[in-house]
């Protein structure tokens, strides 16, 4: 997990995104424990409430769940939920701005496709 304290993205959101990335990359598997609030807050020297706020975002989305006195765990089906969430956001986050910039530069759809193929 990496946190960028100079980023405009709030730390609690970076924490949630890092946990999501860990789930998508297979670091955290379904029904396995994730690092505790204390572990993360000590490691990065941040307030435990900040970590808890990031965790709460994921709890609200059903990505992780809490076992009282044991810790936070990855929910069943969370990887699929995250893939769908990120696919849904991909168009608005990347494709729209790509198309807008391509229009400004007079780059054709075919040229964009060719550029993408080069990057594979």
Image (cartoon, rainbow, N blue to C red):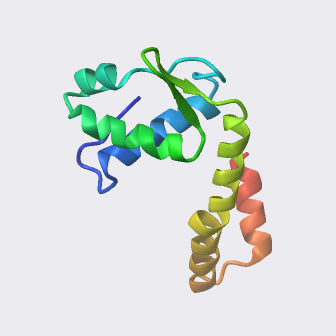
* Residue projecting furthest to the right: 110
Q: Residue at x 29, y 57 (%)?
A: 8
Q: Is residue 12 above or below residue 88?
A: above
Q: Is residue 97 above or below residue 77?
A: below
Nearest the viewer among 91 and 64 is: 64
* Total marks placed: 0
Place residue 107 in its image quadrant. Answer: bottom right
Q: Position of residue 102 (x, y in %)?
A: 62, 77
Place residue 91 in its image quadrant. Answer: bottom right
Place residue 25 in its image quadrant. Answer: top right
Horizontal side of residue 89 vs 114, given as left or right:
left
Nearest the viewer among 19 and 66 is: 66
Q: Residue at x 74, y 78 (%)?
A: 108
Horizontal side of residue 35 vs 116, given as left or right:
left
Q: Is residue 86 above or below residue 108?
A: above
* Residue projecting furthest to the top: 70
Q: Position of residue 115 (x, y in %)?
A: 70, 60
């Amino acid at each position: 997990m990496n946190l960028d304290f100079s980023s405009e993205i709030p730390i609690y959101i970076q924490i949630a995104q890092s946990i999501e990335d860990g789930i998508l990359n297979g670091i955290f598997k379904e029904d396995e424990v994730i690092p505790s609030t204390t572990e993360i807050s000590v490691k990065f020297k941040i307030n435990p409430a900040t970590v808890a706020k990031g965790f709460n975002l994921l709890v609200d989305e059903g990505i992780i769940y809490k076992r009282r006195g044991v810790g936070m765990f990855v929910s069943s089906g969370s990887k699929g939920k995250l893939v769908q969430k990120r696919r849904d956001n991909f168009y608005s986050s990347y494709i729209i701005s790509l198309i807008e910039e391509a229009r400004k530069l007079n780059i054709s759809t075919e040229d964009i496709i060719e550029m993408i193929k080069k990057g594979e």
